[in-house]
Image (tube, rainbow, N blue to C red):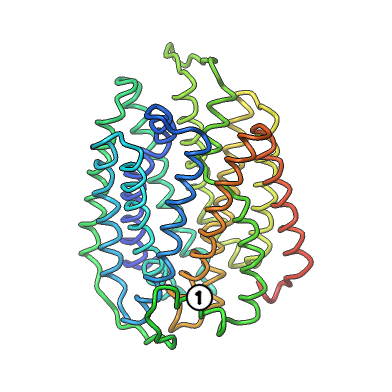
Amino acid sequence: MKVITRTVFILSMISLLADIASEMLYPVIPVYLKDIGFSVLAIGILEGVVNFTAGISKGYFGKMSDDKGLRLPFVKLGYLLSAISKPLIVTFSNIAWVFFVRTADRLGKGIRTAARDALLSQEATRETKARVFGFHRSMDTVGAAIGPVLALIYLYYYPGGYTILFYLAFIPGLLAVLLIFLLKEKKQPVSTLRDGHFFSFFRYWNIASPDFRKIVPALLLFALFNSSDVFLLLITRQTIGDQTISVAGATFNADTITIAAYIFYNLVYAAASYPLGVLADRLGFRNVIVGGFLLFAVVYGGFAFNPGIPAIFILFSVYGLYAAATEGVIKAWVTNLAHKENTATAIGFYTSCESISTLMASIIAGALWTSFGSSSTFLVTAGVALLVSLYFLLRVNRKQA
């Protein structure tokens, strides 16, 4: 059986282009926000709120996708909304406007994610699911690496020219939307949860399998302390300070070094996602995810002690391995534990709960940073990752994984 089908490949290319658009901006957004008056705590609240919006809507739109037996309308609308929000964010520098546009951007993610992941799931078997999601994450992350490279090149020649960069990000976002029209809708089984109010997807817990109920709470505890990557970018920028490095006669400051480190992370993430997906299909999801959480603890523990520039690049490469070992593999695990007729609802349930946790995580991280210093944020997070790893090793056996 062909593992990477036409649908999987096109969906992966769509994600690649959409991530080029998003990641052209992601490394500069915290800097831009600080320039227009956001504090570190306000950035934490903003990132938490927008991710919460994306997550809570994933559940609703995932269930709606199952109720209607349709995927592509949600995929199209979601990617379109995210694309048009890119240039809008710099239309006004008003803080309320930035909150509104960033929320709209993430709402697009919420509309499309569960339906898209359900499409990926139906293209795979239980034995190939981790590698299908791994391939998708790999292509997605290639886009996430290309985006910052384009931003780095642009900012090298036009330092501080953020406004034009936001407009340029609209181009790959629009191309992603156009690619969706190459896909064809397939008939889906009808959902067994036929209740249409906004939070009805939470009822999935009532019919979820025992393994789903055992695994998801532990994943959510980890999410409760896994704050936005913005904090990694901020600590990197803070640690580097006024240091510069010279490469081939060119001098790079803290901003460009931070973006370069983030690019390096994405390159490792992209290269490792598919191989670790294959490994998860063979060794079990639990084993690979636990390994990823342990790597995560190493990264966050390392950033707590003001690493030098070479160590920063090493930590970002390890962070790439963590992401490759967890992001796609967790989705594969969740869909394998879901009922076929409620796949999008199960994904939406998990990601909605995850985003509630992420909202709290970003607020907690910002509050810890402001009250006790940056090291406290990273040490606490590393400790929780170790606890969750121990839970999976002691409470989840190989068969459940």
Mark 1 surroundings within 10 Å by alpha-carbon count, few (fewer than 14), some (14 through 19), many (20 or more): some
Image quadrant containing the N terminus: bottom left
Q: Of all residues shown, which one is farthest toward the top?
A: 249
- Disc 1 marks which amino acid? Phe
- Residue to which mark 1 is pinned: 202
Mark 1: secondary structure: helix
Q: Tell me if residue 384 comes above or below residue 264 in the rendering.
A: below
Q: Is residue 202 left or right of residue 220?
A: left
Q: Tell me if residue 319 comes above or below residue 345 in the rendering.
A: above
Give the residue at x 37% y 87%. 190
Provide residue 236's location: percent of width, then percent of height: 56, 29
Q: Tell me if residue 171 comes above or below residue 352 in the rendering.
A: above
Provide residue 44's location: percent of width, then percent of height: 51, 42
Provide residue 133's location: percent of width, then percent of height: 47, 63
Would you identify the image quadrant in which residue 220 lies? Answer: bottom right
Q: Is residue 316 left or right of residue 121?
A: right
Give the residue at x 42% y 65%. 58
Q: Tell me if residue 74 comes above or below residue 149 in the rendering.
A: below
